[in-house]
Image (cartoon, rainbow, N blue to C red):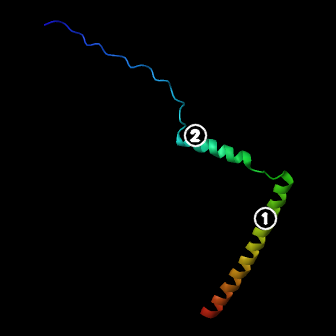
Amino acid sequence: MADTKIKKTEKPAKPSAPKKPNKIAKWWNETIGELRKVTWPTREEALHMTKIVLIVVFAMAVFLGIVDFLFSELIGTIVG
């Protein structure tokens, strides 16, 4: 028997297509793009809005505390 070597044919190199970003990279790039479109408040506007939020939270806490106290007294009167 004759020694016959099988030659492997090499495939021609394909031109490399640009890599598609994975889902996380795509999400990150889109997020950064959207954040660049945002109109950010100035420092003074941010402080003003923060003060408003704190005042509203404090007022709601006082209101809910009073309502809770009144309902507790009402239930205590009915049960007791």
Precedes in sequence: disc 2 or disc 1: 2
Q: Mark 2 packing: few (<14 Cα in 10 Å), some, or many (20+)?
A: few
Is residue 18 placed above or below 67 in the rendered structure? above
Q: Are marks 2 and 1 in contact (CB under 8 Å)?
A: no
In the image, 36: left or right of 47? left
> Which label sits in the foreground, 2 or 1?
2
Front residue (pair 45, 58): 45
Q: Which mark is residue 72?
A: none
In the image, 68: left or right of 43? left
Whole-percent x and y of residue 10?
A: 37, 17
Whole-percent x and y of residue 57?
A: 75, 68
Instruction: Kindly identify the residue that appears in the image at 19 percent across and 7 percent down.
Output: 3
Figure quadrant of the N terminus: top left
Instruction: Kindly identify the residue that appears in the image at 74 percent across and 73 percent down.
Output: 60
Whole-percent x and y of residue 42?
A: 84, 51
Whole-percent x and y of residue 51?
A: 82, 62
In the image, 10: left or right of 47? left
Front residue (pair 6, 44): 6
Amino acid type at mark 1:
Leu
Amino acid type at mark 2:
Ala
Instruction: Kindly identify the residue that appears in the image at 44 percent across and 20 percent down.
Output: 13
Is residue 74 placed above or below 15 in the rendered structure? below
- Give the secondary structure at mark 2: helix
Front residue (pair 36, 56): 36
State the image quarter where residue 80 is shown. bottom right
Instruction: Kindly identify the residue that appears in the image at 71 percent across and 82 percent down.
Output: 67
Is residue 25 placed above or below 41 in the rendered structure? above
**Which residue lies under the disc numbered 2?**
25
Residue furthest top in the image: 2
**Which residue lies under the disc numbered 1?**
54
Is residue 39 placed above or below 5 in the rendered structure? below
